[in-house]
Image (tube, coloured by chain):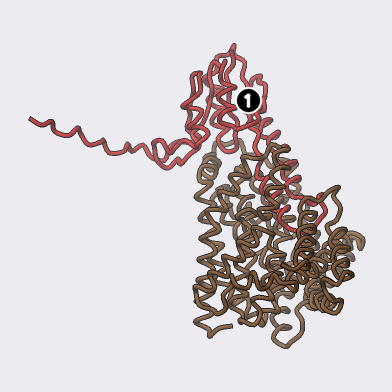
Amino acid sequence: MSIGIVVAIAALVAVLVVAIARPRNLPEAVVAVPLALLLVVVRMLPPADAWAEVRSLVPVVAFLAAVLVLGQLCEDEGLFVAAGGWMARTSAGSPTRLLTAVVAIAAVTTAVLSLDATVVLLTPVVFATAARIGARARPHVYACTHLANSASLLLPVSNLTNLLAFRATGLGFARFAGLMALPWLLVVIVERVAVGRYFRTDLAAAAAVDPGRSPAVTAPHATQAAAGGRPAAAPGVAAVVVGATLVGFVVASAVGIDPAWVAAAGATVLAVHSIARRRVTAAALGRSLNVPFLAFVLALGVVVRAVIDNGLSTAVGTLVPGGSSLGALLVVALVAALLANVVNNLPAILLLLPLLAGHGAGPVLAALVGVNVGPNLTYVGSLATLLWRRIARAHDADPGLAEYHLLGALTVPVSIVVATSALWAGLALTGGG
Amino acid sequence: MAVLVWVAEGTWPACIDAAAQWAPPTSEVVLLVTEGTHGADAAHTAFAGMLGRGRPERDPGARIAAMGAAATEEMLEAAAGRLGRASTARTLSGRPERALVEAAAAAELLVLARDGELERLGPHSLGPVTRFVVDHAPCPILLVWPRRPTTTALPPPPPGPPPSRP
């Protein structure tokens, strides 16, 4: 083993450990960017290669930035609060119906506005909605956080992993969505069934209140604001802009324009509208860009490139088969899921992409199934989970986490096999990538 | 001696009504809530899993924990109002089933509701926590239906003993 690979892996581990443990709440980029530069300075990675990596990632990062801003603007425009109101009405007081509504909204939100929007913006609304109808919130919150990962299969914008892999698939926006639609739908159904079964007691217990005799479970004011009591802004404009942006992705991709431009246009239109209506300030909008995160993604890309070029590709390459047979796709998805659980899904897809490139769209999409669905097993990756458990113990939240992992163990293997099989069938029926 | 009432989402109105009816007028009524995570742990873990986003102030787990505490507070207020007589509230931390059993050590009566599958009679009409408490609590228990059961059909009788050999 060369000294190069040892240094590069050490740098990657350092980047990941800091990103997960976050000493003193420093932005992750504070360590990742200098380490990436250091690898270039000591010639672990030739400057030309590092520059090529950065240049290839810039459109992805720009796309990501636009989607993050779009999600935040939808929040500012009241779209998530409106979704909470819709979920509460659809449930008609029944926790099982609420769960179905939550699953539907979380699946769509994740697909369209990415997992960041679901975790950060939708999950609190889901809690507030459950509290509002007097349901026990845990099943709904768990479903929402689970779907933030597993429902991120559908579109290239649904997850940063998809954005990173989109070009390597060689597919257009519509074709990507077409191939991932059935896997996405099946995974969402698996989650609904699994969560409903796992939490059947909680769901039945809260359903027990007779609407007739219960003392109208009052909407708590603390939660009312988040769930729809707040005078709703008009989320219609936000919904229309998001819808138009989606159509724009498909059209742009078909005529050869980078969809990142469409995302930027959508975010700009909504930003102008929101600023004009004084629902958001330019400064707040700047913060939702999250520049340190974007810098972190670029730096992580450079560090992973150094790891690959110094010889890891041959090691992992022997584990990853080529071809698009069902067996090969399943192996790719499982290796990707495993890797996502060991080192987190972002570095996992960055490590896998160079090895899968040139084998067509099938293996890349299978890897996405693995890295997107897989994290529900341990979420942060096992290394990270170990660190996290220490923090969790300090908060005395351990039993909940054990339950969390149990639910993951129930859904992840089934979801990966079902989604990969559906992907394989889609590829076979439509003549490959 | 006190009458304890477990106040939990969904089942508390029935428990409160039972307490109002059966607790002796001279007894102290204590409303128990078990400290739950409300899913805040899941939201926190999901946020921790998103590498590189930084900004702990955006952690949805913290927001859910705060909203959860407020929702519990309001549930207790509503329960106390429905009871219509003086009561005190107590929050139990730790595993709910064990905390409830420990709290019941010196109680006069513990009021609980069935919180399992309510479509049929039988052992599954109790959720795991309630099952544990019913099986282990040292005090008398008043177990109520959170709503009228949808069925009164008993399961078929078990087969008789095998015919004895001559």
**B119 or A185, which lies in front?**
A185
**A342 or B94, which lies in front?**
A342
Q: Secondary structure at mark 1?
A: strand
Q: Quadrant of residue A73?
A: bottom right
Compared to residue B92, the image places residue A408 above or below, namely below
Seen in the image, is A246 located left or right of residue A190?
Answer: right
Chain in red (letter): B
**A213 or A425, which lies in front?**
A425
Chain in brown (letter): A
Looking at the image, the residue that sits furthest to the bottom is A255
Q: Picture coordinates of residue A139 (x, y %)? A: 59, 48
Query: Residue at the spot x=7%, y=30% of the render?
Result: B166
Seen in the image, is A178 located left or right of residue A42?
Answer: left
| Image quadrant containing the N terminus of chain A | bottom right
Looking at the image, the residue that sits furthest to the left is B166
Q: Picture coordinates of residue A219 (x, y %)? A: 69, 42
Q: Residues within 10 Å of mark 1 (few under 14, many from 20)?
A: many
Question: Chain ID for label 1?
Answer: B
* Residue A79 seen in render: yes
* Residue A291 seen in render: no
Q: Amino acid at mark 1?
A: Leu
| Residue marked by disc 1 | B31
Compared to residue A257, the image places residue A321 above or below, namely above
Q: Quadrant of residue A243?
A: bottom right
Q: Picture coordinates of residue A134 (x, y %)? A: 62, 42
| Image quadrant containing the C terminus of chain A | bottom right
Q: Picture coordinates of residue A332 (x, y %)? A: 58, 70
Q: Quadrant of residue A108?
A: bottom right
Compared to residue B141, the image places residue A154 above or below, namely below
Query: Residue at the spot x=59%, y=32% of the render?
Result: B96
Q: How many marks?
A: 1
